[in-house]
Amino acid sequence: MRAIIQERYGAPNVLKVGEMKCPNPKDNEVLIELEYANVSSGDARLRALNESLLVKLMMKIIYGWNGLRKKIPGVSGAGIVKKIGANVTTFQEGDRVYSINGMKLGHYAEYVTIKETGAIAKIPDNISFKVAAPLSFGALTAYHFINKKNIMKNNNVLIYGASGSVGTYAVQLAKYYGAFVTAVSSAKNHQILKQIGADHTIDYNTIDFRTVDKQYDVIFDAVGFINKKSCSKVLTKKGLFLSVKSITSEKQTLLNEINEIVKTGNLKTVIDKEFSFDEIVQAHEYQDSKHKVGNIVLLIKTTGSEANHK
Ligand SMILES: NC(=O)c1ccc[n+]([C@@H]2O[C@H](COP(=O)([O-])OP(=O)(O)OC[C@H]3O[C@@H](n4cnc5c(N)ncnc54)[C@H](OP(=O)(O)O)[C@@H]3O)[C@@H](O)[C@H]2O)c1
């Protein structure tokens, strides 16, 4: 099968298009024929390994010392179940699914195997593969923080770094739970943020929201650039500070909960750019700019069923 191969860590050009053996699903796995992969900040981190010494060491131990042990990167994507293992009961051949596997990776390829009980879910009928591909990364992360446990109706919620993958889903989720949403990004992205539900926008280049006389019930840092201490004056007494730096989990139950919101039409995927398989280096260069709006997707299957789900 065609696959992107990452033998080393480094700049985007360490990613090469090549051939790998198609995986065979174990008894408890499904084989997915991918239509789209999501090109995420997570993929870029695992490629560049531009981390503190301790994190770098940990990542090398987990993923491989000189390059990816598993060779094929790609944390998340969407496609069709092509084959199921002998014990699989939840999914069947032909199901449209999306998935994430932050440990095993493998979504930058024509086929990937995922455990039946892993972070895989059926794609709701109202969305395409392209729109579904980033959900398991950005929406799943946003949902970990912005959910009915943390957000009350009429809460004042501020999303910092609102225009990225996690941020655009977080804005919509906060709105879905009835909050008044303030979105912080550069000015060029304010229009799109208002379109997806932000009530108020702040340009971080001209205003530091922490110096303005206004308080928030919840502040979510969707890019990991600010800390709780610096927000103490703008958080209400019982205010909640949430940061994407916290650890999240990849669970099928959470993807199914996200699906219920997607079905209402209140959680859309913002797509900035689509790249072809052969443009993987350009896709990563664009991710490395750190200023993408929403998500980047990689087209894997150029002929097929996507046309039926535009
Ligand atoms: N905890 C977890 O499990 C988990 C999971 C996923 C991601 N993450 C982390 O979450 C973070 C965000 O991920 P992502 O995929 O959403 O990133 P992303 O899509 O690459 O973020 C891009 C956005 O960052 C914004 N940005 C850049 N500089 C900024 C600044 N100084 N202040 C505010 N916004 C700024 C840009 O907005 P402008 O162009 O308007 O500047 C752009 O829209 C990453 O650090 C990632 O590692 C953590």
Image: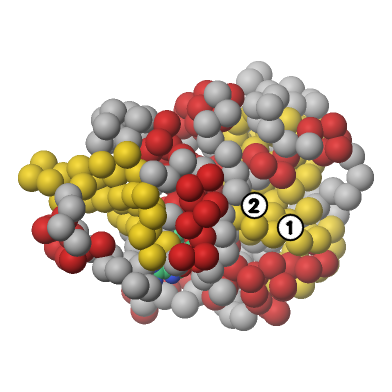
Cβ at disc 1 under 8 Å from ligand 1: no
Residue placed most toward the observer, 159 or 91: 159
The residue indicated by pointer 1 is 274
Q: Residue furthest right?
A: 303
Residue placed most toward the observer, 251 or 278: 278
Q: Position of residue 67 (x, y in %)?
A: 60, 73
Residue type at mark 1 is: Glu
Residue ID at (51%, 43%): 196
173, above or below 230, in the image: above
257, above or below 14, in the image: above
Residue ID at (63%, 20%): 90
Q: Which mark, residue 271?
A: 2
Ligand 1 positioned in quadrant: bottom left
Quick check: 300 left or right of 214? right
Locate the C terminus and report the quarter of the image it occupies: top right
Residue type at mark 2 is: Ile
Quadrant hosting residue 176: top left
Q: Could you tell me which secondary element the residue under label 1 belongs to?
A: strand
